[in-house]
Amino acid sequence: MIKDLRNISYMLGAVLLLVSAVLVMEHVQYGNYLFAIGVALIILNKLSSQYRGTDFRLRRMNRYNLFSAIILVGCSYLQFHDNNSWVVLLLLVAILELFISLRISTHEKAIKAAMKETPPSEQQEQSDTSKPEKLR
């Protein structure tokens, strides 16, 4: 249920970003505020769904994800100050999001493929060695 709520809030934030970007380009007065609300929804979603595992690559991709959210805040700031360079920042965020989503999905597929190749007995031994001594 919470995962569905996260997905809905992320989609709502993305739609607000797209619609409000057009509204800002058309000089509609409340477009800046809708953009800021969309940014807030996306940031809250990214903060609530952080990766907490031990895989270095996934942790690094999560940091890139948070960096793109910070760039969105800068984009919103530039909109409120009538600076047209917010478009460049929004393009940078779109490229980062595309890169991050492709890298995460390919890395997760590689992890699943590696898990299928190892026999179940080795998977059990690997999971036992990853636990601290007190839990064994």
Image (cartoon, rainbow, N blue to C red):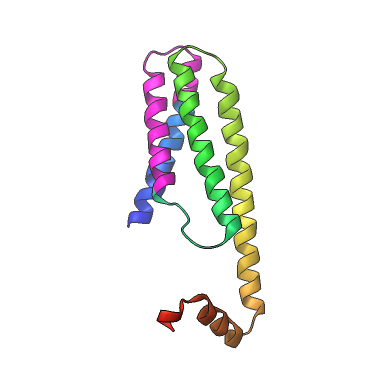
The quadrant holding residue 121 is: bottom right
What kind of secondary structure does the magenta stretch mostly adopt?
helix
Image: magenta residue range: 20-47
Q: Residue furthest front?
A: 133
| Residue 45 within the segment the image draws in magenta | yes
Decide which of 86, 14 is in the foreground and name it.
Answer: 86
At 48% from the left edge and 55% from the top edge, which residue is drawn? Answer: 51
Image quadrant in which you'd find residue 119? bottom right
Image vertical order of residue 57 relative to residue 77, above or below: below
> Of 41 and 25, which appears nearest the observer?
41
Quarter where residue 10 is shown:
top left
Q: Above or below — where is 125 with respect to 40?
A: below
The percent position of residue 126, horizontal first and vertical second, equals 57, 79
| Image spot of residue 30 (x, y percent) | 36, 17
Residue placed farthest to the left in the image? 1
Q: Position of residue 38 (x, y in %)?
A: 40, 32
Instruction: Name the residue furthest bottom.
Output: 121
Q: Quadrant of the N terminus?
A: bottom left
Does the stretch in magenta take in 39?
Answer: yes
Give me the residue at 42% from left, 26% from top. 35
Instruction: Answer with left or right where residue 107 lies relative to residue 30.
Output: right
Up-down: is 33 above or below 112?
above
Q: Nearer the viewer, residue 12 or 134?
A: 134
Q: Position of residue 48 (x, y in %)?
A: 39, 49
